[in-house]
Amino acid sequence: MLIGLAVGSVALFAAAVWLAAPKPPYRPADVGPRQPGKDRVSAAAPNDPAAVAARVASLCQQGRQLVAQGQLQQAQIPLLEARRLDPSSTEVRQYLSNVYYMTGQLELALAEVEEALDLEPDSQLFQQNAAALRRQLSERAESAER
């Protein structure tokens, strides 16, 4: 039980750090139904790195806002799109991992952290999160066997 509390505390700390991190200012144009030409990666510029980066940042902001509002399932939508646009973004993978963790989807959370670790193998945060998730999954499997 004590280990579970420590592991949960580490994950909650990581989620709290993520939520407390400085964020770009809110812009109403980033939220709501799709509007052609409004801060979106257009079909004419899908390979423009600046357009992709701006879109990924916008999607991450949307995800953070939804998490802050407690809409965890809905937060997955913009974060999954951000991951599709920039699969090498460890920031997106960490956000998505946190959302999966908060919704109890530990396997998916671990998969995202492992992908982030592949991209940044020296990251202590990713190493710690992966270890904590593996322990929680192991504990879950052990309790299911009983």
Image: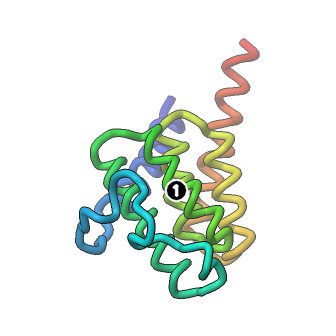
**Image quarter of the C terminus:** top right
Tell me where residue 102 appears, x and y as whole percent. 46, 40
Q: Quadrant of residue 137?
A: top right
Instruction: Return the residue nearer the eye: 113 or 71.
Output: 71
Q: Viewed as shown, does residue 24 lie left or right of 140?
A: left
Tell me where residue 34 appears, x and y as whole percent. 43, 56
Tell me where residue 59 appears, x and y as whole percent. 45, 63
Instruction: Return the residue nearer the eye: 99 or 120.
Output: 99
26 w.r.t. 135: above or below: below
Residue depicted at x 61% and y 73%: 43
Q: Quadrant of residue 89?
A: bottom right
Residue depicted at x 55% and y 78%: 52
Tell me where residue 113 appears, x and y as whole percent. 64, 58
Residue depicted at x 72% and y 26%: 141
Number of numbered discs: 1
Characterize the local packing of mark 1: few (<14), some (14-19) or many (20 or more) Cα atoms within 10 angstroms: many
Residue depicted at x 72% and y 24%: 142
* Circle 1: element type: helix
Q: Quadrant of residue 5?
A: top left
Question: What residue is shown with label 1?
Answer: 79
* Residue, far top: 146
Instruction: Return the residue nearer the eye: 49 or 39.
Output: 39
- Amino acid type assigned to the residue bearing label 1 in the image: Leu
Name the colour scheme.
rainbow
Instruction: Return the residue nearer the eye: 117 or 9.
Output: 117
1 w.r.t. 48: above or below: above
